Image (spheres, helix red, strand yellow):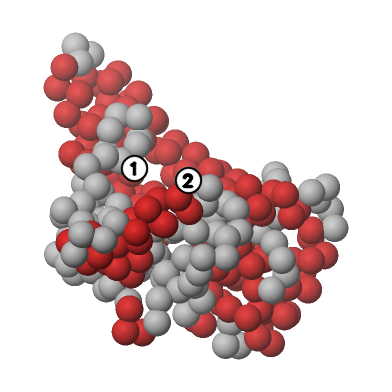
């Protein structure tokens, strides 16, 4: 929900609990793109932001396949494993709806809200809108500034605001779901270069802000990168 991309979310980097581990070429998105990758070797976008749920299912399917070798009743084991793996997409979809519903102020989103969320994400991708800043701006109703096609956003916002009238505390819901500050790539790069020169001030400033990422700050760390500051790829060891 916070725009994090693992980078190389293969089987050995995903635990049995479904949590990812061993972060190498990972990063947080700036401009939203479902196909966004940061690993320099992921040329086919296998581990892209939008593919991560499917990759989680595939990883668990490979785990199930390996465990079948230990089963005494192979037929029953295959049937049980298949049912578990096949149930995962619906479970992940429900979690996606819950988390993205909260990001637009809906505490308990239903399937009827799915299209509204998808429409917003499509607009964000088409307009090159910053992922973190757009969702953070929804809570102050200033998100239209994140779009070049503001008419399209305004049209979407009519339905969105109408939907929020059914919510008790939409602003609180959005505030809890949308960080203001993330460890942006250009800030990490700035921090690394300064540290190499024995200046830890940028590190300390970013580290302090990340301790309370959902709080609005005046240190400009929320700023999206300029064109010259964009870091297109990350590497193991960053």
Q: Residue at image x 34%, y 42%?
A: 57
Horizontal side of 49 relative to 144 (left or right) equals: left
Label 2 crowd bin: few (<14), some (14–19), many (20+), radius 10 Å: few
In the displayed structure image, the side of residue 126 where residue 82 appears, left or right = left
Location of residue 146 with respect to 16 vertically, above or below:
below
Give residue 57's mark.
Answer: 1
In the image, residue 57 sits, relative to residue 116, either above or below, namely above
Secondary element type, mark 1: helix
Instruction: State the residue in front, 154 or 89.
Output: 154
Going from N to C along the chain, the mark reached first, 2 or 1, is 1
At x 79% / y 66%, what residue is drawn? 161
Residue 47 in view of the camera: no
Relative depth, front residue between 45 and 115? 45
Marks 2 & 1, CB-CB < 8 Å contact? no
Where residue 58 sits in the image (x, y, percent)? 28, 44
Question: Where's residue 172, x and y in %?
Answer: 72, 49
In the image, what residue occupies the spot 48% across and 46% down? 211
Question: In this figure, which residue is indicated by the disc labeled 2?
Answer: 211
Q: Residues within 10 Å of mark 1 (few under 14, many from 20)?
A: some
Name the residue located 35 percent from the left edge and 61 percent from the top edge. 202
Number of marks in the rendered image = 2
Q: Secondary structure at mark 2?
A: loop
Q: Is residue 158 above or below residue 82?
A: below
């Amino acid at each position: 929900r916070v725009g994090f991309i693992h980078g190389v979310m293969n089987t050995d980097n995903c635990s049995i609990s479904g949590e990812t581990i061993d972060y190498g070429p990972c990063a947080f998105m700036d401009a939203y793109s479902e196909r966004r990758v940061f690993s320099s070797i992921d040329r086919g976008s296998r581990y892209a932001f939008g593919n991560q749920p499917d990759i989680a299912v595939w990883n668990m399917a490979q785990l199930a396949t390996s465990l079948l070798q230990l089963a005494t009743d192979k037929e029953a084991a295959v049937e049980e494993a298949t049912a578990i793996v096949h149930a995962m997409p619906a479970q992940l979809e429900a979690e996606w709806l819950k988390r993205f519903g909260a990001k637009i102020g809906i505490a308990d989103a239903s399937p009827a809200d799915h299209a509204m969320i998808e429409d917003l994400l499509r607009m964000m991708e088409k307009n090159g809108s910053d992922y973190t800043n757009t969702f953070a701006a929804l809570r102050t109703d200033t998100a239209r500034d994140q779009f070049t096609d503001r008419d399209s956003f305004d049209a979407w916002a009519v339905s969105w605001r109408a939907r929020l009238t059914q919510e008790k505390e939409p602003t609180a819901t959005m505030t809890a779901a949308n960080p203001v500050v993330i460890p942006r790539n250009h800030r990490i790069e700035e921090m690394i270069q300064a540290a190499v020169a024995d200046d830890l001030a940028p590190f300390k400033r970013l580290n302090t802000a990340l301790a309370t990422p959902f709080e609005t700050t005046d240190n400009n760390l929320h700023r999206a990168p300029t064109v010259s500051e964009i870091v297109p790829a990350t590497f193991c060891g960053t």
